[in-house]
Image: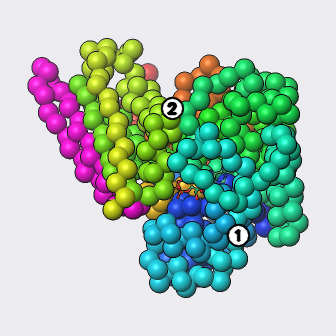
Amino acid sequence: MAHGSAKIAKAEGKLGVLLPGLGAVSSTFIAGVYSVLRGDSRPFGSVTQMGTTRLGKRTEHRRPLIKEIVPLTRLEQLVFGGWDIFPDNVYQAALKAGVLDRTLVDSLKKELSAIRPMKAVFDRRYVKKLDGPNVKQGRTKMDLALGLVDDIERFRKEHRCSRVVTIWCASTEAFQKKARVHQSLKAFESGLKRNDPDISPSQVYAYAALLTGSPYVNGSPNLSCDIPAIVELAHEKHLPIGGKDFKTGQTLMKTIIAPGLKARMLGLHGWFSTNILGNRDGEVLDDPASFKTKEESKLSVLDTILQPDLYPELYGKINHKVRIEYYPPRGDNKEGWDNIDIFGWLGYPMQIKVNFLCRDSILAAPVVLDLALFMDLAHRAGMGGIQEWLSFYFKSPMSAPGLYPEHDLFIQQTKLKNTLRHLAGEELITHLGWEYYKRDYEQPN
Ligand SMILES: NC(=O)c1ccc[n+]([C@@H]2O[C@H](COP(=O)([O-])OP(=O)(O)OC[C@H]3O[C@@H](n4cnc5c(N)ncnc54)[C@H](O)[C@@H]3O)[C@@H](O)[C@H]2O)c1
């Protein structure tokens, strides 16, 4: 066994969680952790806080909490910080986002007001719908990156953090394809120095975070760390990275339903998804360039789950459409509709309709928490580079070059749990279960 808990560094001291983007998701996450710590709420939706995992044979009845088998940082060890283009502190940001009840937010006013955003690295070309005053000035993108490095180091000292993780929770950037400047660390660093327009702000954050020794996660669909240059830096520094796009809402439902249809060899003619939302994320996505980034991330899901190349008769001609409509009256309370046209035995058509009245940030907040704690675990376990075992949390998971990403939530869950068993030095579970039926299955000689 390469790992085993003895080889994982202890979760001692404080863990700084730094968030580029202190908007709806970040403020809901931070306020939620404080509320849980005070004993006022429960961390529903968080696998690190609520999840158990089976160890050994079913007859052993071992079902410990995940946080009992691997050394995770505890909630009381977390400290929060971040950057935003608006100067609002997290208390103000939580009120503006309107996700949590005012009484809950007011009860945390002291803690939340103390978290003020550092000056952001921002470029309107990547987010056309927003503009704000709390922005860093610098001659080159390298200067801006070094400014972020200073921010992280200052935060680390001020809060006496043993470790830091950085999680991009800022707005979705305009769609971009990987360019030459993204292909190697050398090209990227020279691009930073000559202000290459193909380097987006989220890539500057990713670079800066890794320079300081912090793992980096991308919660949005834009490329950010999903470029060879940043992957190379993560290898070089042996630091974990992960992305893209938190898996919540409609896509979460898609990756729950689609594997079920495929498991039973039910065919699919089409899947039409539309949703309305009225938060700032929705406003940013109202710009076609930002929406295209999101659309690509949402569309890729079905193909990899259904494998149309293997099952052309069932999934070869799917009409898959995704729409997002910005509709301010809804705020963060998104409503999604899915119309799924399926077919079964002898080709007879059937329909499934899903009407999901979800709360985006309520679904995303525990994902941020789990990713912070699991990335920190990976770091202490000496696991650098792409953390594919955390695909469970992403709409568009990163994977090793040449390897297709795994989208099926249940395969992702099995991978997550087996990775935790492996880290804990426990046997992996194959679910074969032969041993319980040995007498019946094995022929007498
Ligand atoms: N809520 C979900 O379920 C969910 C799911 C998947 C992905 N996401 C992604 O998470 C991100 C955050 O979502 P949200 O609802 O909190 O959005 P939000 O608009 O409330 O917050 C984003 C914040 O980022 C700030 N920002 C923009 N560019 C920045 C930059 N360069 N540096 C620092 N700050 C910057 C904005 O000012 C804003 O306050 C979005 O990209 C969204 O697509 C959210």
Which residue bears the numbered disc 1?
116
Q: For the point 53% across and 79% down, which residue is it?
A: 105
Q: Amino acid at mark 2?
A: Glu
Q: Which residues are magenta?
A: 330-358
Q: Which circle marks residue 11 in the picture?
A: none
Snapshot quadrant of residue 151? bottom right
Q: Residue at x 31, y 16 (%)?
A: 316
Rendered image coloring scheme = rainbow
Q: How far apart in space, not on screen, are marks 1 and 2 (Cα)? A: 37 Å
- Expressed as whole percent of the image width and height from the top left, the position of residue 262 reads 32, 29
Q: Position of residue 218 (x, y in %)?
A: 63, 44
Q: Residue 192: x and y, percent?
A: 81, 34
Hey, what amino acid is under mark 1?
Arg
Image quadrant assignment for residue 76 = bottom right
Residue nearest the viewer, comparing 41 with 225: 225
Mark on residue 406?
2
Q: Is residue 228 left or right of residue 262?
A: right
Residue 231's place in the image compared with 150, above or below, is: above
Q: Which quarter shows the N terminus?
A: top right
